Image (cartoon, helix red, strand yellow):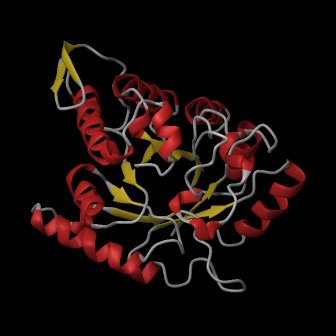
Amino acid sequence: MDIGIIMFPTDKAIQPMALARACEERGFESLWFPEHSHIPTSRETPWGGRPELGPLPEDYWRTHDQFVALTACAAVTQKLRLGTGITLVAQRDPIWLAKEVASLDMISGGRFELGIGYGWNVEEMRNHKLDFKQRREILREYMLLMKELWTKEEASFSGKYVNFEKSWAWPKPTQRPHPPVLMGGAAGPKTADHIAEFCDGWMPIGGLYDFDSGLKAVHEACKKRGRDPSTLSLGMFFAMPPEGQNPLAGLAERGVTRAILPIPAAPADVVLPILDNYAKLV
């Protein structure tokens, strides 16, 4: 099983370049950064849309731009795969996002993976002029648009939310046909259908959702679309079990091939010992 690391890359934490070097030196397969453009102080929406999770940690409003941070990581590493965990696709301009993804994939030598998600913060989306209720279909349309830009020499797109005329857009991604697209979050019927339609894998958050029922929904959605479920990779963000248990226990037999372990957004003297402990699993 591949083992990766996820951290909120904030102004108070070990900086992305130093973290990337440390991860590669210890043999981790990948490094993942979340994103939020900002967090409105009104705090209308509970953390993750779930009141039981409690107050939102300040890491959420202190993050670097994930593409800037990952590009810096690419410049100081050779083998470490670099991913977004996750990109809030519906809040971004899809034409620019397609270029950012392709550019980072080329600059990194084909080491980038695009983790995507719908998002949960209603007021953050509202500031981006995004209707929360439409975020799922907007994400779908944006992903289909980006695939056109990544794979066609002359691309065009006509949809409900965005249109563009026949155009040129380079660079193209180094990975063909494009970097892996991995859906985060719980897999209900709609999400499962999107995974089956335009994703290369599913990476939910460990312990937050019912993984087994989600996996069943994904398999059913694949069958409806005539897709072999084995063509999808399975990973898990924040793959942390109850205290004292192996974080990888029970994952492999369910088909999970990548476990992403969390570290706090903290200085190097806190983070590096945790990485050393995780490295024993590698």
Q: How many marks?
A: 0
Residue pictured at 46% horizontal, 30% vertical? 128
- The residue lying at 28 percent from left, 77 percent from top is 216
Q: Can the viewer see residue 41 in this picture?
A: yes
Q: Nearer the viewer, residue 235 or 88?
A: 88
Q: Quadrant of the C terminus?
A: bottom right
Query: Which quadrant of the structure image shows residue 21?
Result: top right
Question: Extreme right residue here?
Answer: 269
Along the line of sight, which residue is nearer the eye, 47 or 228? 47
* Residue 109 seen from this side: no
Q: Quadrant of residue 97?
A: top left
Residue 63 image point, x, y percent = 67, 39
| 35 w.r.t. 223: above or below | above
Position in image of residue 104 (x %, y %):
49, 30
Query: At which x and y percent is residue 22?
Result: 75, 49
Pick the front one: 82 or 135: 135
Answer with left or right where residue 48 lies relative to residue 21.
Answer: left
79 shown above or below 27:
above
- Residue 228 is situated, as x and y percent measured from the top left of the image, at 17, 66
Residue at 64%, 36% in the rendered image: 73
Q: Residue drawn at (54%, 58%), measured in percent from left and top? A: 48
Instruction: Looking at the picture, tell me which residue is in the foreground, 248 or 96.
Output: 96
